[in-house]
Image (tube, rainbow, N blue to C red):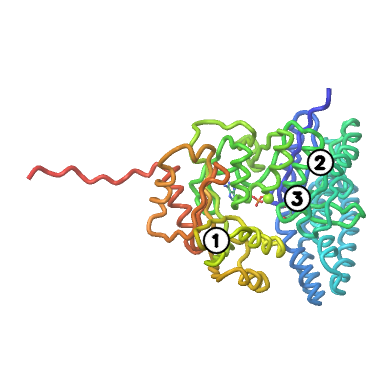
Amino acid sequence: MSERITVLKFGGTSVEDAAAIQRVAGIVRAQAGARVVVISALSRVTDALVKAAALAESGYQPGARAAIEPHIGRHGAVADRLLSLPGAAAARRELTAVADRLTRLLDQAAGGAGAGVRDAIVACGEDLSAPLVAAVLAASNTAAVHVDPRRCIVTDAHHGAATALQPLTGERTAAALRPLRAAGQVPVLGGFVGATASGATTTLGRGGSDVTAALVGAALDAVEIQIWTDVPGVLTADPRVVPEARTIGRLTYAEAAELAYFGAKVLHPRTIEPAVARGIPVRILDSRHPGGSSTLVGAEPEGRRGSIKAIAHKTGITVVQITAVKMLGTHGFLHALFEVFARHRAVVDVVTTSEVSVSLTLEQPDPRPELLADLERLGVVSVERDRAIVCVVGDGLHDSPGIAGRVFEAVGDINIYLISQGASRVNLTFVVEARRVAEVVRRVHAAVFEEVPVPRRPAREPA
Ligand code: ADP
Ligand code: ASP
Ligand code: MG
């Protein structure tokens, strides 16, 4: 019988400092059975590396070094706090090797080296964090060994947002990790990072460590993929916007995919794909409260169908409307339209059509003039910037009358620009002005999750 493996992925805030990494060691130790660990960069490190790469490319080397120097120091401080003297010295040697490589990469970036070098720079966050966490785990009675993710995750060459190639990734991951597991060891990989078949470093897009966890889980046919983060699971809304948001016990894959896609950053949208393909449950847990609430994402819907599970939102959206009276009723118009978006690699989220026009949302604050010029060949184009998408998610939403009415009643006097319901059967999506989106999410949340009592008028005194 094959060994039942659990994949544990820890996000940036779960490894932000020595105290957090010590909690990680406790969580990994407490997990029974075979384990594989996936580690993000320490919090804020990837942002700093992205900034450093941009500064280096613009020729400002001292600024690039200054952006990352303090973060390199944070890793050394963790080693000193959590490892023995010789252990800390060995970890510091490894950290220095990565830091030196980073310096060379920043020099190359200054010479205009391009997207490949940028990926190699940004990957250094996980190259620093994963060996360090492996050393801390090994020092706390877990037989952990660091594995370079480039040996496992084989991707296309789309730098900055690469896609893993299958079945190669599955085969390489299994080949690299199974022998370690057989020897009773716990592999520790940096997330987010892969390599092309010819060995060039790539990254999987921001938040991509979740994707690594799912790919590894699928390759090893894991029993569960655990995403450890800084909130107690998937909540009914982003807690930064709605402090009253509460944990959702269970979600279906379809619900989780919609939430992730429409802005619930707690789970990367592409995490779901490999998990669904293998039917592997994904659990989201809080590394600060390991025994507390969590969310289980799986195939089975639970609870009352037709109930609303959560509200997601994302900003930085532009609405584009193309009006083409001449095209009305002609074949091939939509094809020509979407071909333009495909050619410009522009991601379209929501589409609505009327008899003479098509409105759609783009996930970019400022569409490129070349894209708009190509669209203008098809019709009259109008552009509305600074919009946000709100997405209400719940399995069976569409079979239950009255929900849309409740949602829009709660939105009240705030203008709604686009509405889409029906494509996935689990969401109701609409577009509002970005500056009003927090208010909209709070209003809808209050109406559907917080039983806000409707103020009653006192009974009239008889005249
Ligand atoms: P990590 O570094 O662990 O990958 P992320 O920052 O990527 O963590 O994701 C966790 C964050 O997602 C939370 O801090 C929270 O602000 C945000 N978030 C947005 N929507 C939701 C939601 N519906 N439920 C939980 N968290 C959410
Ligand atoms: N470190 C990467 C990021 O910040 C990947 C991840 O944390 O998931 O986007
Ligand atoms: Mg994340």
Residue wearing tag 2: 137
* Few, some or many residues within 10 Å of mark 3 (<14, 14–19, 20+): many
Tell me if 408 is positioned left or right of 249 in this view. Answer: left
Helix, strand or loop for disc 3 = loop
Residue occupying the point 46% across, 52% down? 442
Percent across and percent down for residue 155 are: 83, 51
Q: Say whether residue 97 is left or right of residue 384.
A: right
Q: Residue at x 65, y 62 (%)?
A: 336
Name the N-terminal-most of marks 1 and 2.
Answer: 2
Q: Give the amino acid type for the residue marked by disc 2 in the picture.
A: Leu
Identify the residue under disc 1: 358
Task: Give residue 117's position: percent from left, percent from top.
Answer: 85, 64
Q: Residues within 10 Å of mark 1 (few under 14, many from 20)?
A: some
User: Which percent across, then down, holds residue 75?
Assistant: 79, 55
CB under 8 Å between discs 1 and 3: no
**Three-letter residue code for mark 1:** Val
User: Which one is nearer the viewer's eye here, 339 or 418?
Assistant: 339
The amino acid sitting under disc 3 is Ser
